[in-house]
Image (cartoon, rainbow, N blue to C red):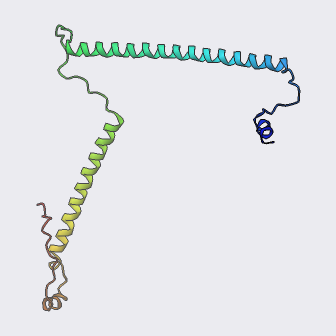
Amino acid sequence: MADTQTADTTQQVTSQIPITQKNPKRVAAGKAIAVKRRQAREEQNKKLAEADAVMAKERLRKAEEEARKAEAVVDPPVETPVATPATAPPADLTTTQWLTIASIIVSLAAIYYKREEIKGTIAKIKAPLAKTPAPMAHAIANEPVLSAPKKKGIRPMD
């Protein structure tokens, strides 16, 4: 009995249903799709090869242009001096350069304005007693004179 049980477990299970034929239309459609995909892949590879060739030509053209520029810089052609005006016309300034010039002018104006403001403040501090009215002079004379401490870092520009 033990021998028959081992024989049963080693047998392969097979289906009792007969194998049917595949749908020939579906097989043909699958083959057609595979052919179209292969052709599309080949076409894409051709386009990539063409693009690589164009890019390589462009790189070569740029390299040749750079070589010509470098050669022109190293060995400039000898020219006979032509009578030119003493001063060359000024070059156009870029937007960034114009903005830089404007910011410098504004900062200089701000410094000048602050200088005038500081001068006026110092002048007011130095002479408050000279402009006091006469009736109050005796009241102020009894009080100690308060003056603002001088700032060591700012000197008046005379």
In the picture, measured across the screen, residue 66 lies left or right of residue 13, that is: left
Quarter of the figure with residue 157: bottom left
- Return the x and y of residue 115 as percentages of the image width and height: 20, 59
For residue 128, above or below residue 69? below
Task: Judge by depth and name the residue closer to the eye, 133 or 92.
Answer: 92
The number of discs equals 0
| Most distant residue in the right direction | 17
- Residue under the point 82% across and 21% down: 26
In the picture, measured across the screen, residue 36 lies left or right of residue 108, that is: right
Quarter of the figure with residue 1: top right
- Residue under the point 25% across and 57% down: 113
- Residue under the point 37% across and 16% down: 62
- Return the x and y of residue 8 as percentages of the image width and height: 80, 37
For residue 141, above or below residue 18? below
In the picture, measured across the screen, residue 148 lies left or right of residue 33, that is: left
Task: Judge by depth and name the residue closer to the eye, 141 or 134.
Answer: 141
For residue 146, above or below residue 94? below
- Return the x and y of residue 59 as percentages of the image width and height: 40, 17
- Return the x and y of residue 50 as percentages of the image width and height: 52, 13
- Residue under the point 33% across and 41% down: 99
In the picture, measured across the screen, residue 91 lies left or right of residue 5, that is: left
